[in-house]
Amino acid sequence: MLKNIPNILSSELLKTLMEMGHGDEIVLADGNFPAASHNDRVIRADGHGVPDLLEGILTLLPLDTYVEKQVAVMAVVKGDPVPEIWDKFKTILKPYKPVAIETMERFAFYERAKKAYAIVATGETAIYANIILKKGVVAKSASLTV
């Protein structure tokens, strides 16, 4: 057992987050996303929603401050309403300033997901609840005294 690790994060997901380096990307995918056909590294998070996982991951994963847009979502298809879940994403991301969100055409999003370090396949039922996070660096902290 470890302290201060959000319990929504599985050991497999923690290991993946640790393996990722600066600039690597991770996709949090809704239940409709074709995860297995788009990446060989798929982490199952059935029964969990994207917002809860996003909150847990952001407590550990630094976002890339060296790029213009650290986060990407899949654009809605013409005629579909703007997803309400995007407001949840914005609320969760707000404390992690500065964060810019890119909106990507669906097939461009799929291609980017193929190049991602991993895809987390969730049980999220909201549509357009797919989000890509680009990992940044952990800044050097003050030296520890023992």
Image (cartoon, rainbow, N blue to C red):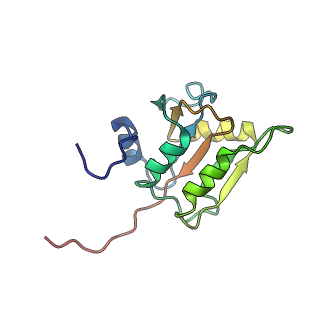
The residue sitting at the top extreme is 37
Asked if residue 21 is positioned above or below residue 10 in the image, the reply reads below
Residue at 26% over, 51% down:
3
Q: Which quadrant holds residue 60?
A: bottom left
With 8 as the anchor, is 127 left or right in this view? right
Q: Quadrant of residue 34?
A: top right
Q: Residue at x 48, y 50 (%)?
A: 55
> In screen coordinates, is 47 left or right of 29?
left
Total numbered badges shown on the rendered structure: 0
Q: Residue 30: x and y, percent?
A: 60, 34
User: In this orientation, which residue lies closer to the viewer: 34 or 23?
Assistant: 34
Residue nearest the observer in this picture, 110 or 131: 131
Quadrant for the N terminus, please: top left
Which of these two is toward me, 102 or 111?
102
For the C terminus, which image quadrant?
bottom left
Q: Position of residue 109 (x, y in %)?
A: 68, 41
Query: Relative to residue 56, is residue 111 drawn left or right?
Result: right
x and y, in percent, of residue 108 in the image: 72, 41
The answer to whether residue 59 of the structure is visible from this angle is: yes
Q: Quadrant of residue 35?
A: top right
Q: Residue furthest left?
A: 146
Q: Where residue 20 sits in the image (x, y, percent)?
A: 43, 47
| Residue pictured at 51% horizontal, 47% vertical | 54
Judge whether residue 27 can be spotted in this image. Answer: no
